[in-house]
């Protein structure tokens, strides 16, 4: 329970009440930013319920529905409310597993409806991603290494920031590889294409130890998430990309461009490290739902009869 301190006692009681113990057990499954995000969500719900005299593990579905509606009344976006409710459902699911309660009161919560159309955020197309890499190369080795780590290897922001030079020193079956610890503390080995390897070596600049993405504008300190967001956004603007670009959009770009290049869906799933193939399939379905839409075939069919 390395992350237990992220969830403090909310009301000063000792020993911890069962609700807080259940929260610690739930949070112990996660690491990194996920722990912080989930802690905020649990704290919001716990505080709201306790302010109304309800201990979280004693809550009924009606209490949780009221809390969800209070989030909407505060003006939170439907996607944010849906995310919060997903965390709460998971918390109560494990409270049942850990035998704190007999049933999950959040199981049938009404979750908000919102536009999940992924065609709006499928990442950059081939020309945009190519322009971004070229611009990053002109800006300097750290910029290029950061952009290819995100847009070619499909790393998450935190993963890219955490690359150590020693992490890509190994060779496996004729390939130089990068070893990362990703989401859910899952280790992964990623082969490095020659252009990516060259970019990494330029960023390392002869060093054999230490962080790969050392920020030259910050006395060589390691890259962090905020600095990476700034690097990506500023490079995208300089590349002439009209909309704001975040680091995770480059991960989307890797997935959709790999599919456009003809890489089989299963291989893209492995490269993206998606546990559920349905998530990868969603990218495939949405990237092609305009080009392959049935109306095109129907229109051509009807034109033949005109």
Image (cartoon, helix red, strand yellow):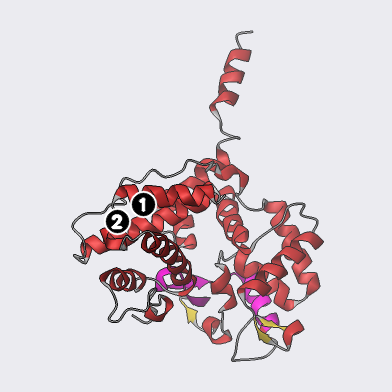
Is 28 left, or right, of 136 in this rendering? left
Image quarter of the C terminus: top right
**Rendered image: mark on residue 130:** none
Residue 177, given in percent of the width and then of the height, sits at 51, 76
Specify few, some or many for label 1: CA neighbours under 10 Å numbering under 14, 14-19, or 20 or more. many
Quarter occupied by residue 143 = bottom right
Is 41 left, or right, of 295 in this rendering? left
Quarter occupied by residue 292 = top right
In this rendering, does residue 264 appear at all?
no
Q: Nearer the viewer, residue 116 or 281?
A: 116
In this rendering, does residue 41 appear at all?
yes
Image quarter of the N terminus: bottom left
Please report whichever mark, 1 or 2, sits nearer to the chain's N-terminal start: 2
> For residue 105: magenta?
no
Q: Nearer the viewer, residue 8 or 95?
A: 8
Residue 66, given in percent of the width and then of the height, sits at 40, 48
Specify few, some or many for label 2: CA neighbours under 10 Å numbering under 14, 14-19, or 20 or more. some
Is 18 left, or right, of 179 in this rendering? left
Is 257 left, or right, of 203 in this rendering? left
> For residue 177: magenta?
yes
Q: Badges 1 and 2: C-beta atoms under 8 Å apart?
A: yes
**Numbered disc 2: secondary structure:** loop
Image position of 31 with respect to 60: above or below: below
- For this orientation, the residue located farthest to the top is 306
**Mark 2, residue position:** 59
Q: Which residues are magenta?
A: 174-203
Q: Name which residue lies at 40% across and 81% down.
A: 5
Q: Name which residue lies at 31% across and 49% down.
A: 61
Image position of 268 with respect to 158: above or below: above
Residue 260, given in percent of the width and then of the height, sits at 59, 48
**Numbered disc 1: secondary structure:** helix
**Mark 1, residue position:** 64
């Amino acid at each position: 329970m390395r992350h237990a301190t992220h969830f403090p006692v909310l009301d000063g009681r000792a020993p911890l009440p069962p609700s807080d113990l259940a929260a610690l057990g739930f949070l112990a499954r996660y690491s990194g930013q996920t722990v912080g995000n989930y802690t905020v969500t649990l704290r919001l719900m716990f505080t709201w319920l306790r302010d109304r005299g309800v201990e979280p593990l004693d809550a009924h579905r009606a209490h949780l529905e009221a809390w969800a509606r209070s989030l909407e009344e505060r003006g939170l976006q439907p996607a944010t409310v849906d995310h919060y409710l997903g965390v709460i459902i998971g918390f109560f699911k494990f409270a049942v597993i850990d035998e704190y309660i007999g049933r999950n009161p959040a199981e049938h919560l009404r979750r908000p409806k919102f536009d999940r159309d992924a065609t709006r955020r499928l990442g950059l197309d081939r020309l945009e991603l190519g322009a971004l890499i070229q611009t990053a190369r002109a800006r300097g080795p750290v910029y290029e290494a950061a952009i290819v780590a995100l847009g070619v290897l499909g790393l998450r922001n935190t993963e890219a920031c955490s690359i150590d030079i020693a992490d890509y020193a190994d060779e496996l079956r004729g390939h130089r590889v990068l070893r990362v610890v990703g989401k859910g503390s899952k280790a992964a080995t990623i082969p490095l294409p020659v252009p990516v390897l060259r970019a990494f070596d330029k960023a390392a600049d002869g060093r054999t130890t230490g962080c790969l993405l050392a920020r030259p504008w910050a006395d060589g300190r390691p890259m962090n998430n905020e600095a990476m967001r700034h690097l990506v956004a500023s490079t995208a603007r300089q590349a002439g990309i009209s909309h704001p670009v975040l680091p995770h959009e480059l991960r989307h770009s890797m997935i959709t461009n790999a599919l456009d290049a003809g890489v089989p869906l299963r291989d893209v799933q492995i490269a993206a490290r998606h546990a559920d193939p349905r998530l990868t399939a969603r990218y495939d379905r949405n990237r092609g739902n305009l080009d392959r839409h049935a109306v095109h075939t129907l229109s051509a069919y009807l034109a033949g009869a005109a």
